[in-house]
Image (spheres, helix red, strand yellow):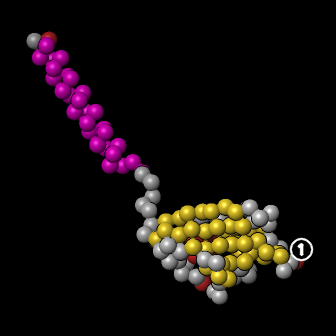
Amino acid sequence: MNNKKLILAAIALVAIIAVLVGVYLATRSGPAAAGAKAITVTVVHSDGTEKVFHYNTDAEKLGAYLEEQGLIESQGADAGMFHTVDGEKADWNVNQSYWAFYLGEDYAMTGIYDTDIADGGVYKLVYTIG
C-alpha cells in the first residue's frame, strides 16, 4: 500500500512540475523579435575614434529610431536637429562643430529625421568642425 501511495505522489509531483514548466515557457519574456531591416551606423568622434553599431529594426525613419535607441539626442525646439551622438555633444556656438550625416560614404542630402531606413543601410555620423 505504501508503494502505491509513493508512486501516486511521484506522478503528481512530475505533473505539477510539468505544468509549472509549461506556464513558465508560455509566459516568459524572451528577446525582442529582430526587425526585418539590418542597418549599420558608424560614429566618428572628435578624436577620430570610430564606433560601429549594428541594429535590426522594423522602424521607418532613421532619426527617430536612433533617438529611441539612445544613440542620438535632439535639440528639442530645433526639429530635425541633433546635437549629441554616442554621448558626445557638438555645439556650433562654441567651436562651430556639428554632426555630419552620411549615407554610406556620401554626404546625405536629407536630414536624419527624414531618412527612410533601408535594409542593409550603412549610415555614418561624423563629428565635424565648421
**Which residue is depicted at the point 65% across and 88% down?**
109
User: Residue 124 falls in which quadrant of the image?
Assistant: bottom right
Q: Is residue 11 left or right of residue 95?
A: left
Q: Nearer the viewer, residue 128 or 111?
A: 128
Q: Is residue 46 visible?
A: yes
Q: In the rendering, at what x and y percent does residue 111 appear?
A: 65, 83
Q: Amino acid at mark 1?
A: Val
**Which residue is depicted at the point 74% across and 75% down?**
99
Query: Of helix, strand and loop, which mostly describes the magenta segment?
Result: helix
Q: Is residue 13 above or below residue 38?
A: above
Q: Is residue 108 magenta?
A: no
Q: Is residue 57 visible?
A: no
| Quarter of the image that includes the C terminus | bottom right
Residue extent of the magenta highlight: 3-29
| Quarter of the image that includes the N terminus | top left
Most extreme residue toward the bottom is 109
Dot 1 lies on which element?
helix
Q: Nearer the viewer, residue 64 or 39?
A: 39
* Residue that badge 1 annotates: 94
Q: In the rendering, at what x and y percent does residue 85 appear?
A: 71, 67
Most extreme residue toward the top is 2
Q: Nearer the viewer, residue 91 or 78?
A: 91
Most extreme residue toward the right is 94
Q: In the rendering, at what x and y percent does residue 3 appear?
A: 13, 13
**Which residue is depicted at the point 33% across and 45% down?**
25
Q: In the rendering, at what x and y percent does residue 61 appear?
A: 55, 78
Q: Is residue 2 above or below residue 80?
A: above
- Label 1 crowd bin: few (<14), some (14–19), many (20+), radius 10 Å: few
**Which residue is depicted at the point 67% across and 83% down?**
107
User: Residue 31 falls in which quadrant of the image?
Assistant: bottom left
